[in-house]
Image (spheres, helix red, strand yellow):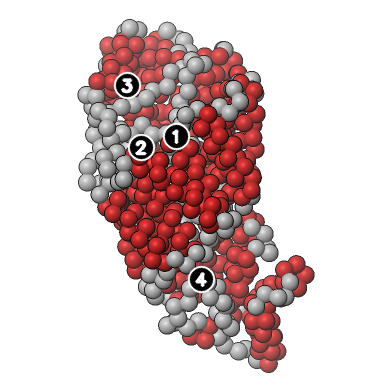
């Protein structure tokens, strides 16, 4: 899935280890990783899914210089037709030996230039050898964190193959699209990433047919990308297709089918269909038991516990979590991050059931593990755990502690590529915490940074983005930046109306905030129009039992009275609209003339 395939060096590997795709039907540029449940399910307090910071490398260590292309192009030795294959082999051998990326980069650039020079000299079309050298070159750039430089290289690799010339050319183009999609993902450009995956899938289907097992793997990969982008309907469609293909080619209760069902459970859970999610997880667990995959069974037990907790079946959730905890402790050790992740789930469960002492104890146990992680623990695992624990501190009205944990999580991820959306989610959460404690300028800055990252990553049309805009607008109101707040509320309104519908609670909240803002700006008629629309929605579709109905009705009556009594009346000041000293949380009811968080 985007962000899951990376050519960065693993912790226990030599200095550089790059996997370069082979251009033949048996190859694949994709790797498998079990997907994680998207966490942003509470719009008022945005939570990162996993999740994504600026992919730029730290400025402390400048990247190594590339060889000068002009010098290479003028090298007469590149005209030798035997030089390109030799240099490509040297590049691969250098990567395998771990000598370092700079020398391999030199060989790869010279190899690709040689292949192009020879093709020009012979007045021939570039060969698939050029495509392979460009794939190697793009992989080396990615390993150096120079993703922007990898993009034009991989785009060139896509344009070389001619699909009409047979299977090899088609699969070469497919491989290029998948590698380019991964690169866009590491840049946080999710929309472009998905577009590349879709083009690759189409080429693969045309070459191999719709029911080939390799098509199933690509469908699943694309489904994971759509889950990451929160396009759950499209993800469900692709995952069903993957299940059908694997059922046709695999034995019953296969590991492939179990992986598909775990992904389908994530999609169903995100859509609120918990019973279907539970059914898929139980079937996946049975398949993993049949294949002797104890650790995978334990991971599924954690997911089953999450579903039980969503269904308020807390005793069954505790049982599932404890089963998983026993397996992880025996197989991984008491200080493994998987053990800490179960502690976090138990802490959340006991917090929900009002057992705050047990909840705090499990939080402390998890934090001790994260403070001294075992070798091999990734920064993403620690950051994800800290973010979940911060949500518990937020719920028990300890925003300062929650802020400290979020700041630690963001520091862990700031130099990691492909984490732009995750960082944006953390910054949005920090903005909420800062707003609650009355640090409105910092809150606005945090929201602004999150909005910038979400815009650049292609999530500017998601409901999550609309919620963050609403939160930023509230911070602007507290800073008396009414014009800016109005623009943010209007954009949030357009997004939420499209993504959630006019009757959704988040959309209604933005309507209320926008009406109060219009009144503060003296645009009484616009405020009246919005409140009339909200009341009409409640009376005709939502019902009038909601306690906000009477507040909105009173606000409208006062606005109508004021509009009829004083045409040139000055705008109501912000001191009358909001209480500057208020520390209302998002769970409090709306007060008269108040804004909604």
Q: Which mark is residue 331?
A: 2
Badge 2 marks a residue whose secondary structure is helix
Asked if one can make out residue 464 in the rendered structure from this viewpoint, the answer is no
Q: Residues within 10 Å of mark 3 (few under 14, many from 20)?
A: many
Label 4–label 1 contact, CB within 8 A:
no
Q: Which residue in the structure is indicated by mark 1?
A: 294
Q: Which residue in the structure is indicated by mark 4?
A: 586
Q: Is residue 88 above or below residue 241?
A: above
Badge 4 marks a residue whose secondary structure is loop
* Disc nearer the start of the sequence (4/3): 3
Q: Nearer the viewer, residue 151 or 5?
A: 5
Q: Which residue in the structure is indicated by mark 3?
A: 108
* Disc nearer the start of the sequence (2/1): 1
* Disc nearer the start of the sequence (3/2): 3
Q: Residue furthest bottom?
A: 565
Expressed as whole percent of the image width and height from the top left, the position of residue 395 reads 45, 67
- Mark 4 vs mark 1, foreground winner is 1
């Amino acid at each position: 899935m985007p962000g899951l395939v990376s050519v960065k060096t693993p912790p226990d590997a030599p200095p550089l280890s790059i996997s370069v795709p082979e251009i033949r039907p048996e190859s694949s540029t994709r790797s498998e990783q079990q997907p994680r449940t998207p966490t942003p399910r509470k719009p008022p307090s945005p939570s990162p899914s996993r999740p994504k910071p600026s992919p730029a490398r730290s400025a402390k260590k400048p990247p190594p210089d590339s060889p000068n292309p002009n010098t290479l192009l003028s090298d007469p030795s590149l005209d030798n037709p035997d030089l390109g294959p030799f240099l490509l082999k040297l590049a691969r051998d250098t990567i395998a030996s771990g000598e370092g990326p700079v020398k391999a980069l030199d060989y790869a650039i010279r190899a690709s230039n040689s292949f192009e020079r020879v093709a020009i000299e012979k007045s021939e079309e570039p060969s698939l050898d050029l495509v392979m050298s460009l794939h190697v070159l793009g992989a080396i750039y990615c390993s150096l964190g120079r993703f922007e430089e990898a993009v034009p290289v991989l785009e060139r690799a896509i344009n070389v193959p001619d699909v009409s010339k047979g299977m090899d050319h088609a699969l070469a183009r497919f491989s290029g699209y998948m590698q380019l999609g991964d690169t866009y993902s590491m840049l946080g450009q999710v929309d472009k990433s998905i577009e590349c995956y879709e083009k690759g899938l189409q080429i693969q289907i045309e070459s191999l047919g719709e029911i080939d097992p390799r098509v199933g793997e690509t469908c699943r990969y694309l489904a994971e990308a759509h889950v990451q982008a929160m396009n759950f309907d499209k993800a469900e469609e692709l995952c069903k297709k993957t299940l059908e293909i694997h059922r046709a080619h695999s034995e019953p209760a296969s590991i492939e089918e179990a992986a598909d069902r775990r992904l389908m459970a994530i999609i169903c859970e995100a859509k609120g269909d918990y019973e279907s999610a539970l059914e898929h997880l139980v079937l996946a667990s049975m398949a993993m038991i049949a294949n002797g995959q104890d650790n995978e069974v334990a991971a599924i037990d954690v997911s089953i516990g999450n579903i039980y907790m969503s269904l308020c079946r807390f005793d069954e959730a505790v049982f599932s979590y404890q089963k998983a905890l026993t397996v992880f402790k025996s197989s991984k050790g008491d200080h493994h991050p998987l053990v800490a992740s179960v502690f976090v789930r138990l802490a959340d469960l006991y917090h929900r059931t009002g057992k705050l002492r047990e909840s705090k104890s499990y939080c402390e146990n998890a934090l001790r593990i994260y403070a001294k992680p075992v070798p091999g623990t990734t920064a993403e695992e620690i950051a994800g755990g800290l973010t979940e624990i911060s949500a518990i501190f937020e719920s028990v009205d300890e925003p300062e502690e929650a802020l400290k944990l979020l700041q630690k999580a963001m520091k862990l991820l700031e130099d990691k590529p492909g984490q732009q959306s995750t960082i944006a989610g953390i910054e949005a959460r920090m903005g909420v915490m800062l707003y609650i404690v009355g640090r409105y300028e910092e809150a606005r800055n945090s929201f602004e940074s999150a909005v910038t990252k979400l815009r650049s990553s292609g999530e500017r049309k998601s409901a999550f983005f609309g919620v963050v805009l609403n939160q930023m607008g509230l911070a602007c109101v507290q800073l008396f930046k009414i014009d800016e707040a109005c623009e943010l509320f209007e954009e949030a309104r357009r997004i939420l109306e499209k993504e959630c519908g006019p009757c959704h609670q988040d959309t209604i909240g933005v309507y209320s905030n926008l009406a109060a803002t219009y009144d503060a700006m003296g645009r009484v008629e616009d405020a009246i129009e919005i409140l009339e629309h909200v009341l009409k929605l409640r009376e005709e579709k939502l019902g009038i039992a909601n306690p906000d109905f009477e507040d909105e009705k009173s606000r409208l009556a006062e606005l109508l009275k004021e509009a009829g009594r004083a045409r040139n009346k000055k705008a109501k000041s912000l001191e009358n609209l909001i209480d500057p000293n208020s520390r209302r949380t998002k769970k409090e009811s709306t007060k008269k003339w108040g804004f909604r968080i």
